[in-house]
């Protein structure tokens, strides 16, 4: 999808980021953001973004903007969060990571990790991030790549585990928002993360692996063993009006879990006689089981965010070899998503996207709008030339 330097789909909303850049950098910044939103799938790398700008410079200029930056990406992210988070109280803070498969072993930071979706080991970048949802606000907060220990030593980087990175990102995120609950999957239900959140007095909700130990009377028992001891009559029907389609039966209790303390345990079943269970745990022991379940369902927002960024915003289409350049690309994708998903607070963009909420549909509508603008300007220039 072609565009020009004068293409502007954000109105005056981008101007708040102007202090981060010099005059040439400002031009490259706008080019990159527009390229992420207007480019077709497979066209969101530096070379294609530069080629799609009709009156742009050679791709080497845009490449230097990303790989040899002299601007502060942390300042850019701070302004993004300041301008995009309207309501900082309530909602949920979600923690998760995303694998971005790559095919170049010479890329900094890549390593072989297990992809649980495809159930195979892939060469990838592992991106840990936090995401805040409050009402119609959906804002990615902080991001940091996880680099395996042997790769970090090769790059002379300070090694941090995914858990250490997660704690760092949660600390930064909690300085920005005050959520009702922090939500994450079973992989992050570690003692370090739970201790950190408990020390802050923050409620958390997580899925738990079936082999986690809970205390029943004087014995420690695995969750799956405990669940099999329950009777069908111990489970209550989830009312249809809640809109839950997958799980139909719920059981709740308070138990002492090893390395987690006293927790609210929620066990979910798809059918009353099903032999498979899903376990949720939370330190909010006063919450009902349905409320804990409602919090955890909101974790899906970050999965949708990852999907949208991969399918429509080119988060995995970068070809930069330096890890610093990858981090810059990630922050610019986060900015593009934030501007697009929160278009309701930008009158100019909201007018273009009236009634459109899905990221894919919004990108398509923006492309049609830009094409109409290009045709309108072409006809105007042709008419002026004829006069």
Image: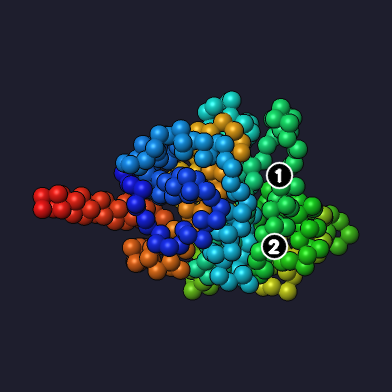
> Does residue 145 appear anywhere in the picture?
yes
Q: CA distance from mark 2 to mark 1?
A: 18 Å
Q: Is residue 122 above or below residue 345?
A: above
10 relative to 183 in the view: left or right: left
Q: Secondary structure at mark 2?
A: helix
Q: Nearer the viewer, residue 227 or 286?
A: 286
Q: Nearer the viewer, residue 354 or 219?
A: 354
Q: Which label lies toward us, 2 or 1? A: 2
Please report the residue visible at 13 percent of the width from the left and 53 percent of the height from the top: 383
Q: Which residue is mark 1?
A: 162
305 relative to 371 in the view: left or right: right
Residue 34 in picture, x, y percent from top left:
40, 49
Q: Secondary structure at mark 1?
A: helix
Please report the residue visible at 35 percent of the width from the left and 63 percent of the height from the top: 353
For label 1, the crowd category at 10 Å Cα-Cα, with few meaning under 14, some 14 to 19 and many 20 or more, is many
Q: How many marks?
A: 2
318 relative to 371 in the view: left or right: right
Q: Which residue is mark 2?
A: 174
């Amino acid at each position: 999808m072609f565009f020009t330097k004068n293409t502007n789909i954000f109105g005056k909303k981008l101007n708040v980021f102007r202090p981060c850049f010099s005059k040439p950098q400002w031009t490259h910044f706008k080019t990159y953001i527009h390229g992420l939103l207007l480019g077709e799938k497979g066209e969101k790398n530096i070379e294609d973004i530069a080629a799609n700008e009709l009156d742009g410079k050679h791709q080497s200029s845009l490449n230097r903007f990303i790989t040899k930056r002299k601007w502060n990406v942390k300042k850019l992210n701070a302004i993004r969060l300041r301008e995009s988070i309207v309501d900082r109280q309530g909602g949920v803070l979600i923690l998760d990571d995303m694998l971005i498969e790559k095919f170049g072993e010479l890329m900094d930071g890549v390593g072989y990790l297990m992809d649980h979706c495809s159930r195979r080991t892939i060469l990838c970048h592992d991106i840990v991030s936090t995401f805040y949802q409050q009402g119609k606000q959906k804002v990615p907060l902080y991001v940091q790549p996880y680099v395996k220990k042997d790769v970090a030593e090769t790059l002379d980087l300070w090694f941090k585990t995914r858990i250490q990175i997660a704690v760092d990102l949660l600390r930064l995120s909690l300085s920005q928002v005050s959520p009702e609950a922090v939500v994450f999957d079973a992989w992050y239900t570690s003692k370090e993360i739970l201790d950190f959140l408990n020390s802050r007095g923050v409620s958390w909700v997580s899925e738990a692996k079936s082999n986690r130990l809970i205390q029943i009377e004087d014995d420690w028992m695995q969750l799956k063993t405990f669940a099999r001891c329950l009777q069908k009559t111990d489970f209550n029907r989830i009312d249809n009006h809640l809109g839950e389609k997958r799980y139909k039966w719920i059981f709740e209790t308070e138990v002492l879990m090893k390395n987690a303390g006293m927790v609210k345990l929620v066990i979910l079943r798809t059918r009353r006689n099903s032999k498979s269970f899903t376990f949720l745990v939370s330190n909010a022991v006063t919450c009902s089981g349905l409320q804990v379940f409602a919090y955890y369902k909101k974790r899906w927002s970050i999965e949708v965010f990852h999907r949208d960024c991969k399918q429509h915003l080119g988060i995995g289409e970068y070809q930069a070899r330096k890890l610093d350049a990858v981090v810059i690309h990630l922050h610019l994708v986060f900015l593009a998503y934030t501007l697009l998903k929160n278009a309701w607070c930008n009158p100019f963009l909201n007018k273009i996207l009236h009634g459109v909420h899905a990221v894919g549909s919004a990108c398509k509508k923006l492309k049609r709008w830009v094409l109409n603008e290009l045709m309108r300007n072409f006809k105007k220039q042709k008419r002026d030339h004829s006069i």
